């Protein structure tokens, strides 16, 4: 389905980003992985995905909060693959604190990694997409891009901002073959959420299964985590021809969370 297409997926050494990178490579796309981790672990992921799929799989270690590193990553992908046809902005971090106690540097880091990084990558990748008159930009926002929770002011603000960016970009390229959409997952069991389960278990002095049901999934009516593979399947659909008229959308995949 995506033979002859090339993708950059930020934050794809783990969790949802890795799931999307795997789905794209299995559909035939070349993939530039990005994200942090142990060199040996990342190389194993890269090698195994290339071997399994036959796709070209590379890794670039850009810190997406740094515009110069992002420009270098997009240039490296264009150089290696000849194009960046699909751009997925997925890198993200979290920090939880009351707004008046929110550390300034944590606030800035969350805006940088989630919102500013999405601007940097789109700015760098869009000229090539426009030249080829084809592109798919997917911003992995969150249910927290559509609704809020207390103590997550930086994350909620960044994710709402990412959806605003999605809409503006979609309008700017609406007459081309490029689409720009946001995916808004509810809770997906990834290392990012594992960290929240551990800290909430300590805070509430509750066992893991009760933290999951009563704290983490309290707002998710399905009471089930969203599967990484399901988020990846949605991203894959947005990359296909059948999704060419979907643009500027913020699509929930959240077990009913935002239906409340
Ligand atoms: P994760 O912690 O498993 O993965 C995050 C990835 O981002 C990792 O590869 C990490 O190395 C990378 N990363 C972090 N900072 C970076 C930086 N400065 N530069 C480059 N890479 C960086 O997290 P996840 O749960 O898979 O989350 C992925 C995305 O999905 C995030 O944007 C997150 O906000 C969003 N999301 C997650 C959930 C959930 O429940 N897990 C729900 C909704 C939205």
Image: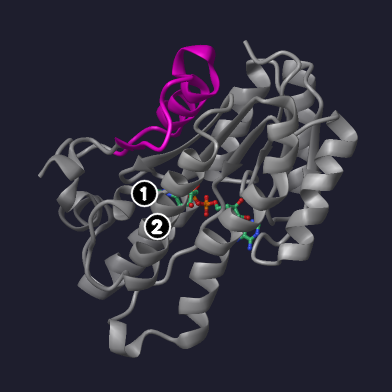
The residue sitting at the front extreme is 175
Do the residues under discs 2 and 1 have CB atoms within 8 angstroms? yes
Q: Is mark 2 within 8 Å of ligand 1?
A: yes
Above or below, 179 relative to 73 = above
Mark 2 nearby-residue class (10 Å; few <14, some 14–19, many ≥20): many
Mark 1: C-beta under 8 Å from nearest atom of ligand 1: yes
Residue 198 in view of the camera: no
Q: Is residue 238 magenta?
A: yes
Identity of the residue drawn at 52% across and 23% down: 236
> Per the image, is 99 magenta?
no
Q: Which residue is mark 1?
A: 142
The picture places residue 14, in percent across and down from the top left corner, at 59, 46
Q: Report whether 233 appears left or right of 1.
A: left
On the rendered image, what quadrant is the C terminus found in? top left
- The quarter of the picture where residue 253 lies is top left
Q: Position of residue 80 (x, y in %)?
A: 89, 34
**Residue segment shown in magenta:** 225-252
């Amino acid at each position: 389905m995506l033979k002859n297409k090339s993708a950059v997926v930020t934050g794809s050494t783990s969790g949802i980003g890795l799931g999307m990178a795997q789905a794209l490579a299995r559909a035939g796309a070349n993939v530039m992985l990005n994200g942090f981790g142990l060199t040996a672990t990342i190389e194993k992921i890269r090698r195994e995905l290339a071997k399994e799929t036959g796709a070209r799989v590379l890794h670039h270690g850009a810190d997406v909060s740094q515009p110069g590193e992002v420009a270098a990553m997009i240039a490296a992908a264009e150089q290696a693959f000849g194009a960046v046809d699909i751009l997925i902005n997925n890198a993200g971090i979290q920090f939880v604190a009351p707004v008046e106690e929110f550390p300034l540097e944590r606030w800035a880091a969350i805006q940088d990694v989630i919102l500013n990084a999405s601007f940097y990558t789109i700015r760098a990748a869009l000229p090539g997409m426009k030249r080829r008159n084809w592109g798919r930009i997917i911003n992995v926002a969150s249910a927290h891009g559509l609704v809020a929770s207390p103590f997550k002011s930086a994350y909620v603000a960044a994710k709402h901002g990412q959806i605003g960016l999605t809409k503006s970009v979609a309008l700017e390229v609406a007459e081309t073959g490029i689409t720009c959409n946001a995916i808004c997952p509810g809770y997906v069991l990834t290392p990012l959420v594992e960290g929240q389960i551990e800290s909430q278990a300590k805070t509430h002095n509750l066992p893991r299964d009760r933290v999951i049901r009563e704290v983490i999934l309290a707002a998710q009516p399905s009471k089930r985590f969203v599967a990484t593979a399901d988020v990846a399947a949605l991203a894959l659909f947005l990359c296909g021809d059948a999704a060419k008229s979907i643009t500027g959308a913020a699509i929930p995949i959240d077990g009913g969370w935002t239906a409340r």
